[in-house]
């Protein structure tokens, strides 16, 4: 293999580039990134960086050690998999023998985003975080549209800055992907910190002359607002692959080894990649979390350099965290696949607990509040396809388990 | 092989404990403890732990 190209210079692309080298590739390695910045870590963008508690430079990842040519500020516009060329903006064709697709996601925008008054933000890039920070510093009232984990984290950060916050979602609870019971715990957390929750209602639009003045609800009511954050999830960046013939119906379609379906010289990693997860009964998953970008990047990069029949299956148990106020919310496994949720440790009232998600008698997910030390064990049980019965028995005998409040 | 953890950076995510339980552990107060000179056989696990640490708090040196 002469030249490996990585498209995407964020965490997944960086880890893939590292793995390509560690797996023994000694030919050329080119990393193409649309952002002008070298790789940086995004979790602080909704937390410490937004709060002003972290310097801009501190979000940079260690990237200089990777022996690669970094082409930053360059967008990939197309792909010709037959001639093995990445087409860059401006028309340059970059040849490859092996390709990593790690182009990530972008925030879902409000329709006709170009017509919105100034003061309506999305959050993905470091510039977004710095601009939102500036706006929050001017004080006033923030309306967060979308109470997923980004929305909830920004609400928490804004409260810590003394900003008045309204948190809205069409769903009945914040963090709705965790289910109604845990979502209620997330709602209580926001309410206790003075956030106004507007749930189960739709937003209709943003109004203001020269600047944002109010957020209009579908029922005709409105909220005064100085700043708004649209946090309605993310969309995989696959447009550049649209005419490549690759399957991009739900992100880049890969097999269980992160190899693009039908194209052994292409692998996918991070937010953009979809693959059949062995621990989800082979269901297609796409995981938009930090840990997946790191782990999948490492595995996909290494696999790209391996012969096809030696490639390793990617079956890592998804894991994510969210820091909100004094609570670290952690989730391992597939909470969305759980049919039942059962409290196994601690208590919701004390905001220190572990809840298990069960499907067909098996443990498929665990969600913890301030239970960091317990989560790696649950993650291992999910990896080992443990039955809920065995997990319950093991927790009952474990002296380190949090006492279950009854 | 030497393993170092910057405890000022550590936020107890526990990713290292999952990647290399032979080396890393969180105590009852969610403080990290680690083996500073693990067996060479654990090199791959130690390096994996460093790469999946969300706050880049782990350093592995020869």
Image: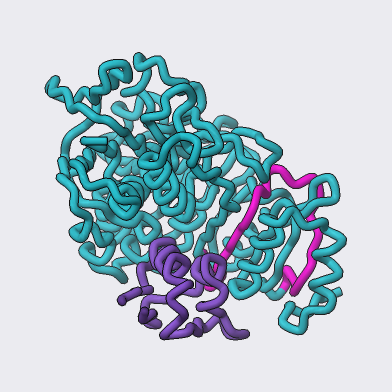
Chain colours: A cyan, B purple
Q: Which residue is drawn at 87% across and 61% down?
A: A389
Q: Residue at x 52, y 52 (%)?
A: A149
Q: Where is residue A288 in the image (x, y as percent from the top left)?
A: 48, 45
Q: Main secondary structure of the magenta part?
A: strand
**Left or right: B32 as drawn, with respect to A210:** right
From where the camera sits, is residue A13 visible? Answer: yes
Looking at the rendered image, the quarter that the C terminus of chain A falls into is bottom right
Viewer-closest of A95 and A297: A95
Q: Where is residue A353 in the image (x, y as percent from the top left)?
A: 70, 70
Q: Position of residue A234 (x, y in %)?
A: 45, 37
Q: Give the range drawn in magenta.
A: A324-349
State whether residue A332 is above or below residue A55. above
State whether residue A238 is above or below residue A306. above
Viewer-closest of A131 and A178: A178
Q: Which residue is drawn at 24% across and 67% down?
A: A55
Q: Residue at x 54, y 48 (%)?
A: A148
């Amino acid at each position: 293999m002469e030249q490996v190209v990585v498209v995407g210079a964020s965490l997944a692309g960086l880890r893939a580039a590292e793995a390509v080298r560690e797996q023994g590739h000694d030919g050329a390695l080119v990393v193409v990134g649309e952002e002008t910045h070298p790789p940086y870590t995004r979790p602080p963008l909704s937390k410490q960086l937004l709060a002003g508690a972290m310097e801009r430079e501190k979000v940079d990842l260690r990237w200089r050690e990777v022996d690669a040519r970094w082409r930053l500020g360059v967008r990939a516009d197309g792909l010709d998999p037959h001639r093995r060329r990445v087409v860059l903006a401006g028309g340059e064709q970059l040849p490859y023998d092996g390709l990593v697709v790690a182009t990530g996601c972008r925030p879902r925008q409000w329709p006709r985003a170009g017509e919105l008054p100034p003061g309506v933000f999305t959050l993905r890039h470091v510039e977004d975080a710095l601009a939102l920070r500036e706006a929050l510093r001017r004080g006033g009232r923030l309306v967060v549209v979308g109470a997923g984990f980004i929305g909830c984290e920004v609400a928490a950060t804004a409260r810590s800055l003394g900003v008045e916050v309204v948190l809205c979602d069409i769903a009945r609870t914040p963090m709705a992907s965790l289910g109604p019971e845990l979502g209620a715990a997330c709602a209580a957390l926001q309410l206790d910190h003075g956030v106004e929750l507007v749930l189960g209602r739709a937003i209709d639009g943003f109004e203001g002359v020269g600047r944002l003045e109010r957020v209009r609800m579908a029922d005709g009511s409105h909220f005064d607002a100085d700043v708004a954050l649209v946090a309605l999830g993310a969309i995989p960046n696959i447009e550049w692959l649209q005419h490549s013939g690759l399957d991009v119906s739900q992100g880049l379609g890969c097999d269980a080894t992160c190899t693009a379906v039908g194209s052994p010289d292409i692998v996918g990693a991070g937010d953009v990649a979809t693959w059949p997860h062995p621990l989800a009964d082979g269901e297609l998953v796409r995981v938009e979390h930090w840990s997946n970008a790191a782990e999948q990047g490492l595995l996909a990069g290494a696999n790209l350099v391996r012969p096809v029949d030696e490639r390793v299956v990617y079956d890592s148990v998804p894991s994510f965290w969210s820091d909100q106020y004094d609570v670290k919310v952690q989730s391992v496994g597939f909470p969305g696949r759980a049919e039942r949720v059962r409290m196994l440790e601690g208590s919701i009232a004390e905001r220190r607990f572990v809840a298990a998600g069960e499907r067909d008698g098996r443990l498929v997910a665990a969600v913890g509040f301030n239970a960091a030390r317990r989560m790696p064990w649950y993650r291992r049980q999910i990896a080992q396809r443990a039955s809920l019965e065995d997990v319950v028995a093991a927790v009952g005998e474990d002296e380190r388990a949090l006492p279950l409040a009854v | 092989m030497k393993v170092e953890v910057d405890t000022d950076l550590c936020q107890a995510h526990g990713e290292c404990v999952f990647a290399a339980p032979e080396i890393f552990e969180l105590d009852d107060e969610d403080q990290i403890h680690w083996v500073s000179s693990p067996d060479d056989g654990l090199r791959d696990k130690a390096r994996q732990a460093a790469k999946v640490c969300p706050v880049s708090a782990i350093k592995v040196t020869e």
